[in-house]
Amino acid sequence: MTRTHARVAVVLGLAALLLVLPLFAEKYYVQFATRILIMAIFAMSLDLLVGYAGLVSLGHAAFYGLAAYTLALVSPQYDGASLWTSLPLAVGAAALVALAIGSLALRTSGVYFIMVTLAFAQMLYFVFHDTKIAGGSDGVYIYVRPVADLFGWRPFSLENVAHFYYVTLALAVTVFVALAVVLRSPFGRVIAGIRVNEHRMRSLGYATFRYKLVCFAIAGGLAGIAGYLAAAQHGNVNPDMMGWHLSGSGLMMVILGGMGTLAGPIVGAVAMLSLEIAFQGVTKHWQLLMGGFIVLVALFLPGGLIGLATAWKRRREGGK
């Protein structure tokens, strides 16, 4: 079997497993898989900035949390908001705020960009934390998940765990395919060129600021999809969803899985959340084990877990 055939077999096997998972797995595992898919979307959106555009942001969770709050604010107290209107509204709000923040933050670079994105995220955090806009520090509850009614017909119900899983899976696949198309387009090639040498791209006549701003807004909108789904799944939205620690967790998923790759953030989300559960069952100081694992990956697998097969192949060939 050739390497290409092996990859196709692995992809088809994983796709089949994801499709049949709700048919044999218990409710807890279906919900856990849904959570992984949500965080995979968030990690993919952050990797667009970090891995492809070279823009390290510590404020990416702001767009995740903003979309979650948008859903909470448009949801009736004892009824579900329309999925078909609330989802675009939440994603649009996240992308619009990302556009506004990016127009200022992208005037800086390096460590200053990191600090400016963090500062904006903390500003939004305290807007919701210190005011009564949406419950203050306690947050706000979403009692009924969004409904998918179309002219009186309901094709699926997000209250059903399996249906929610399949909707999340469909959105995750959509985000993955959309990013693949964007990154292989002329726009994606310009973004990659900016990461390597922005001065050269500018000298070739490209308006690099505009390209980075559009990339920042797209990443913010994609993070909004994850935030919307997280709010719908958990039924609670609070300021911690905008906290810097969530941005840090997303960044660790990207690095752990493989920065600058399409599948890397997904692998990172699966590994990080699965190891978190496993280590919690071993000791109450599970953060030490998680930190040690991430350090080992960073030291011995600079390309992340996605590069494990490549590293193993090279070592095998070197030993011959």
Image (tube, rainbow, N blue to C red):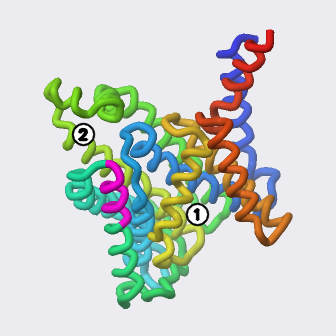
Q: Residue 59 got which mark?
A: none
Callout 2 amino acid: Tyr
**Image location (x, y in percent) of residue 130:** 38, 88
Which quadrant does the C terminus fall into?
top right
Q: Is residue 115 magenta?
A: yes
The image quadrant that residue 184 belongs to is: top left
Q: Secondary structure at mark 1?
A: loop
- Going by the numbered disc 1, the residue's amino acid type is Ser
Point out residue 86 in the picture as x, y percentages from the top left corner.
39, 65
Predominant SS along the magenta part: helix
Neighbour class for label 1 at 10 Å: few (<14), some, many (≥20)? some
Q: Residue at x 42, y 59 (%)?
A: 58
Relative placement, left or right, of 195 versus 281 is left
Quadrant containing the N terminus is: top right
Residue 3 falls in image quadrant? top right
Region rendered in magenta: 110-118
Q: Residue at x 72, y 24 (%)?
A: 9
Figure check: 219 above or below 9: below
| Looking at the image, residue 28 lies above or below residue 168 | below
Q: Is residue 145 visible?
A: yes
Q: Residue furthest top?
A: 320
Q: Which mark's residue is nearer the viewer, 2 or 1?
A: 2
Residue at mark 1: 157
Residue 211, disc: 2
Pointer 2 or 1: first along the chain: 1
Res 85 seen here: no
